[in-house]
Image (spheres, rainbow, N blue to C red):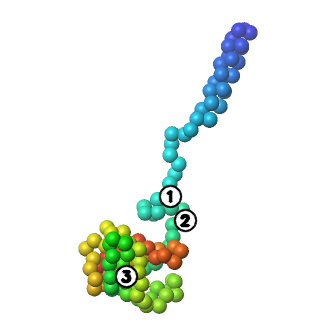
Amino acid sequence: MKTVFLVLLATLGLSGQASAEDLLKPSTTPPPVDDVAAGNSLEAEPAYQAEGVIRAIDARQGSVTIAHGPVPELKWPAMVMPFKADAAQLGGLAVGDAVEFRFSNGEMDPQIVFIRRQ
């Protein structure tokens, strides 16, 4: 009986050591990532909506200048201003196109989230 007890005790002691060693190994599971583009961020910036007319496009610099109507949520009057945009978002658009768009306004650096010709 003592032998069985000692074997059992030794086995439990070794398995506890193995578990402790496993805790010290780096994890192979990547940490969760905020994916703002997919809308999965817990702290995604709010998007604002507006309509306007494209005044200039600079796909190389990643910007589009739009003469847009008022944005009441931001207390903005109608104005002409540049927005950051991906080249892919600007494909098929031209100066003079009437557009509706959504944008984020992080750090006073507005970024187009969605844009389409009306």
Q: Secondary structure at mark 2?
A: loop
Whether residue 102 can be seen here: no
In 3D space, how far apart are the residues under numbered discs 1 and 2 (Cα atoms)?
A: 9 Å
Query: CB of mark 1 within 8 Å of CB of mark 2?
Result: yes
In 3D space, how far apart are the residues under numbered discs 3 and 2 (Cα atoms)?
A: 27 Å
Reply above or below: 14 against 6. below
The amino acid sitting under disc 1 is Asp
- Residue 43 location in percent, x, y? 54, 65
Q: Residue at x 46, y 85 (%)?
A: 71
Q: Label 3 belongs to which residue? A: 65
**First of labels 3, 2 by sequence position:** 2
Residue 43's mark?
Answer: 2
Reply above or below: 67 against 40. below
- Residue 22 location in percent, x, y? 60, 32
How many labels sit on residues?
A: 3
- Looking at this rendering, what residue extends furthest in the right direction? 2
Q: Label 1 belongs to which residue? A: 34
- Residue 33 location in percent, x, y? 50, 54
